[in-house]
Image: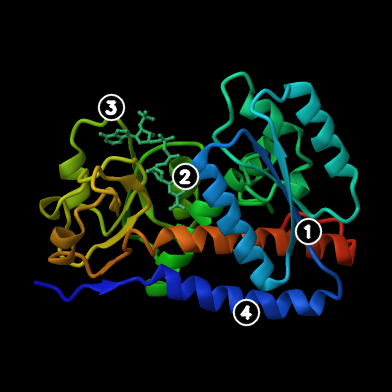
Amino acid sequence: MVETKIIDGKQIAKEFRENLAKKVQKLGSTPKLAVLVVGEHPASQIYVQNKKKAAVSVGIDVDIYQMAVSETQESILKLIGELNEAKDVDGILIQLPLPEHLDAQILIGAIAPQKDVDGLHPHNVGNMVCGLPAMISCTPLACLYLLKHVLPDMTGMNALVIGRSALVGKPLGQLLLQENCTVVQAHSKTKNLADLARQADIIVCAVGKPGLVNGNMIKDGAIVIDVGINRMDDGRIVGDVLFLEAMQKASYITPVPGGVGPMTIAMLLWNVVKAAEGRFSDCKELVLKK
Ligand code: NAP
């Protein structure tokens, strides 16, 4: 049995935010994030308040644009256009999910790429895939940061990414490829998930199914990053990985809660600061890598 160490995302994110706060002080002005919220989805309200609290703690201003659930695509596009032009706004974030009558792709595509702090604009996604400067989406960036915290050089590692969403799985697969991992990307149609998992030095699970990864699927000494967030009937929040079983096998593992979640918010703030640095230095390269 290997001795498993927990990757304490909460503590790592706290230290990261403290360093970021020092960076913000040196900017000489206050970065600003605009958050667009449509409707009153309870989870979204909590996420937005958490982001605001974290942003304020490092010295970033947050303007929340709370809109009615019936808000039209045209009026949101108009607002995005105004925020794109606003000199004092560095980052724009659309809180997902959106009501069904709205097209998230069109709205995200309307954000100026240099203000797309969620890293979801096709320009940023394309640049990231090409290894060019880009805003990179926050959760993949958080996974990479936590991985690098325990394994600075991932060259030659077999990495299994479970999930292929545009938000998490796909960009993370690309980032790990750029870290010289040999990446296998699994999804709902993958047939031999357990076999693939047992060959992996790194497993990242981003699916949203509790218990998808159990101890028998984990190679001794593997590193496990659990992105999943699942609310159980008894109110507990758990990941996709059976934590206690995984603890018998993995060398490192992220807990849920307290793993990828806090780091994701820290990475959002980092993207806002990067965008603000572009504004203050007036440099041409407004979108900066990592
Ligand atoms: P998503 O868009 O629903 O994507 C889920 C992915 O899982 C899809 O690619 C799907 O495959 C795949 N999948 C479904 N069942 C599978 C199975 N049995 N075996 C292998 N793959 C399977 O979800 P998401 O936005 O990527 O989020 C994934 C999870 O991460 C959720 O629990 C979410 O709440 C959580 N999350 C956490 C954070 C954080 O900050 N901690 C941030 C974002 C998301 P197909 O493509 O074939 O359908």
Query: CB of residue at label 3: within 8 Å of ligand 1?
Result: yes
Residue type at tag 1: Lys
Foreground label between 2 and 4: 4
Q: Which coloring applies here?
A: rainbow
| Residue at image mark 4 | 19
| Quadrant position of ligand 1 | top left
Residue 290 appears in view = no
Question: Reading the chain from its start, which is encountered first: label 1 or label 2?
Answer: 1
Residue type at tag 2: Val
Question: Reading the chain from its start, which is encountered first: label 3 or label 2?
Answer: 2
Foreground label between 3 and 1: 1
| Residue at image mark 3 | 189
Seen from the viewer's position, the closer of residues 55 and 250 is 55
Foreground label between 1 and 2: 1
* Residue 161 located left or right of residue 288: left
Residue type at tag 3: Lys
- Distance from disc 4 to disc 1, alpha carbons, whole Å, reads 18 Å
Tell me which residue sits at (18%, 36%) in the image: 192
- Distance from disc 2 to disc 4, alpha carbons, whole Å, reads 25 Å
| Residue at image mark 1 | 32
Foreground label between 4 and 3: 4
| Residue at image mark 2 | 168
- Distance from disc 3 to disc 1, alpha carbons, whole Å, reads 42 Å
Label 3 secondary element: loop
Query: CB of residue at label 2: within 8 Å of ligand 1?
Result: yes
Question: Reading the chain from its start, which is encountered first: label 4 or label 3?
Answer: 4
* Residue 82 located left or right of residue 150: right
Residue type at tag 4: Asn
Residue 132 location in percent, x, y?
67, 51
